[in-house]
Amino acid sequence: MQHGIYLPPFAEFADPRRVAGLAATAEAAGWDGFYLWDHMLSDPGTAVGDAWTTLAAVAMATTRIRLGALVTPLARRRPWVLARQIATLDQLCGGRLIAGIGLGDDGWREFSAFGEETSARARGDLLDEALEVLLQFLGGTVVVHAGSSFAVDSPPFLPTPVQDPVPIWAAVRWPNRKPLARAARLQGCFPVFAAGAARTVPDPEDLIAIRASLATLGARPAQDLVVCCSVRGMSAAEQTEALAAMAAAGVTWRLEAFGRGLDPARVEALAAAGPPTG
């Protein structure tokens, strides 16, 4: 099981130079991944950094660590623009990018503030069509698509990403089962649990059920299962037990949850301390 840092580029971390420095510290300390929230808005008055621009700075400041945006809501993105960003960033970082896609929500009015679609059902349909177009572009082929939301007739995009394919992790809101079919087609599943549970260790029974559902839907056995939680504040024995339970349930990546309002100096100290070893 690999360990990553999962950070909102908000407030002081809206500065891409500070985030790049944090990523370099994390890499030196032994973390395996460095991931950013991808948002347009936060609480009023909060500075928000663009995840993809910031990840370019992270790519230049690191050499080994995996990186990516978790997750990018495809319902507010043009898939050909995102394909260009993915290919360019994967080239820049030497094939270390992991892309995350999801439905997004309107919690900070990130759709309604701009006249975007607010219906979850409609955004789901848009996500699926955008994903189809995105995968064609990333494959480096001619793209001809006539759908309900996109009409494309394009020559291949070059350069293609270094990785073939670029790993894509799909967010799903557990226990909703329908999005699991989307995730099963891709390289990873990033389950989002109940509100307020982001920093707690998931129930192993839920993780086992997710793994079983993905397998039933045709997911590859090697597909990533990614959870976001925190083991900060646990004793060494508690950490060891929690990490072992997640690994036994099939978790391949655990992302340390850093939410809004955490002291930046504290985040930097925790990154420098390295991932748990239990």
Image (tube, helix red, strand yellow):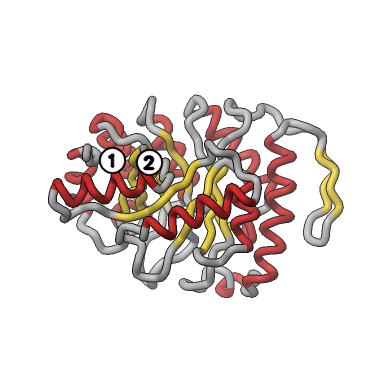
Relative image position of residue 20 (x, y in whole percent): 34, 39
Image quarter of the C terminus: top left
Q: Residue at x 33, y 45 (%)?
A: 5
Q: Quadrant of residue 240?
A: top left
Q: Quadrant of residue 66?
A: top left
- In depth, the one of 166 and 158 nearer the eye is 166
Q: Is residue 252 above or below residue 112?
A: above
Relative image position of residue 121 (x, y in whole percent): 67, 71
Q: Residue furthest left?
A: 235
Left or right of 144? Residue 126 is left
Residue that carries the numbered disc 1 in the rendered image: 22
Relative image position of residue 76 (x, y in whole percent): 62, 60
- In depth, the one of 155 and 70 nearer the eye is 70
Left or right of 55? Residue 238 is left
Q: What residue type is disc 1 on?
A: Leu
Q: Is residue 195 above or below residue 72?
A: below
Q: Is disc 1 in contact with disc 2, using a CB cutoff of under 8 Å?
A: yes
Relative image position of residue 134 (x, y in whole percent): 69, 45
Secondary structure found at label 1: helix
Q: Which mark is residue 34?
A: 2
- In depth, the one of 236 and 168 nearer the eye is 236
Q: Residue at x 51, y 39 (%)?
A: 98
Q: What residue type is disc 2 on?
A: Phe
Mark 1 and mark 2: Cα distance apart in space = 9 Å
Q: Residue at x 43, y 44 (%)?
A: 250
